[in-house]
Image: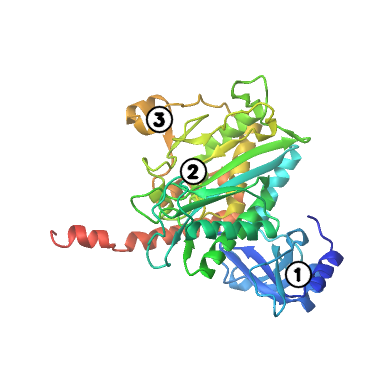
Amino acid sequence: MSLSKTEILKLVKEHNVRFIRLWFTDVLGRLKGLSITRSELAEALDTGMGFDGSSIEGFARIEESDMVALPDPNTFCLLPWRPKQDGSEARMFCDILHPDGRPYEGDPRHALKRALARAAEMGYAYLVGPELEYFYFKDDKAANVLDQCGYFDMAPIDLGTDLRRETIQILEDIGIQVEYDHHEVAPSQHEIDLRYADALTMADNAMTYRMVVKQVAQKHGVYATFMPKPIESENGSGMHVHQSLYKDGHNAFFDSKEPYHLSAVGKSFTAGILAHAREFCVVTNQWINSYKRLVPGYEAPVYISWAQRNRSTMVRLPMYKPGREKATRIELRSPDPACNPYLAFSVMLTAGLNGIKGKYPLPKPVEDDIFEFSGQEREKAGIKTLPGSLYSAIVEAEKSPFLKDALGEHIFRKLIENKKIEWDRYRMHVSNYEIEKYLAIL
């Protein structure tokens, strides 16, 4: 919904909004923000609110720290979880600017806007529908589950079911459409699927979704986490991303005459995703823990391949249903829900557009279970693997002209710097495993 300044000020008065939260993200996708009173809102909508960016991860250095957060009027909504007796609260996402009004090159939202502008120059609109999985635990100290249910289980109503229901009610109250929800494979693991939207709206929605899930859990005395692999012996949490391009109001991925009903554009886009997957893995799977999920045997895709029905592949093409041309899409299954959605959508889109511009050929689909392949069979089929650790992902990313182009020089450099620090700290850490394994024998 597009709102003018006058309309926002009217809504603020009608709903007795006393505080407006201005949200944005750092390079790692952590939600940041500041609150202003309604008396400051008119000026904020005109010129933005200044702040010190030197302490925000991936933002400015101390000597160039002045930043401006300019609210996006299209993202205004009331926050229903706040108490109403002392006045309501609202939020808006912000674009980060230099003091002279130029877009700040370290703003992840700006990186996505750049990618979307490239798509628009080619005549495309980019739509995505992510599936963000997460866990409920008793607290944030240990992975103590709330249930022992499994995939799609319909057990007697438990706390998890009620938490999902309340979360969905809030999401819909603030205008975020939900398709469905269900229990996932692992104990206490859940999923709420958001209805597809343009990528910028969806990135904002994904950030809001993560906040609402955590807010509702906290209200009921439990903890929600989007950590990719919190339980060693169970499936981790993914963020499967359904995506398609539209041109002149039509799905550019659909072609009734082609096998699988996937058009030449759809094939080249998919080929671009496959070709650049190792390079953008540091964005879609950015944490040490991300690579504990990306291992064979737990339904997480490790092998760079595609198929229609095979969920052991990295990219899946959902089956075409007659009369559902608009639903033709590809599903990238490797990202996890702890990524920065702005940057994740940026690299996926840029990879796909590279595939279209370069007319990348799409390899043959792999419909057999790749987890059952031997190393020789995978090599013969030309199937490569995703990086096996954050360090390997950093090595792939650091030498990638594609990734630097997709993120921009500033974000690319800051992200690599941050990930190297994270890896070094992990590398130097002595774990309980090492003590238990080696202390008594070495």
- Using the image, determine if residue 252 lies above or below residue 68: above
Count of marks placed on residues: 3
Mark 3 / mark 1, whichever is N-terminal: 1
- Residue at the image point whose x is 79% and y is 78% from the top: 39
Please state, as top left, top right, bottom left or bottom right, where the N terminus lies in the image.
bottom right
Q: Where 119 falls versus 287 (above or below)?
A: above
- Tell me what residue is drawn at x 57 percent, y 59 percent: 210
Q: Is residue 386 left or right of residue 215?
A: left
Q: How is the image coloured?
A: rainbow
Comparing 108 with 59, the one in front is 108
Image position, residue 213 (x, y; %): 55, 60
Question: Helix, strand or loop at disc 2?
Answer: loop
Mark 1 vs 2: CB contact within 8 A: no
Q: Which residue is mark 2?
A: 334
Mark 1 or mark 2: which comes first in sequence? Answer: 1
* Residue position marked by numbered label 1 in the rendering: 48
Crowd rating for badge 1 (residues with CA inside 10 Å; few <14, some 14–19, many 20+): many
- Which of marks 3 and 2 precedes in the sequence? 2
Crowding at dot 3, Cα within 10 Å, few <14 / some 14-19 / many 20+, comes out as few
| Three-letter code for the amino acid on which mark 1 is drawn | Gly
Hey, which residue is sitting farthest bottom in the picture?
A: 86
Left or right side of 407 for 102: right
Give neighbour class at mark 2: few <14, some 14-19, many 20+ (Cα, 10 Å): many
Question: How far is the residue under mark 1 from the one under mark 2?
Answer: 37 Å
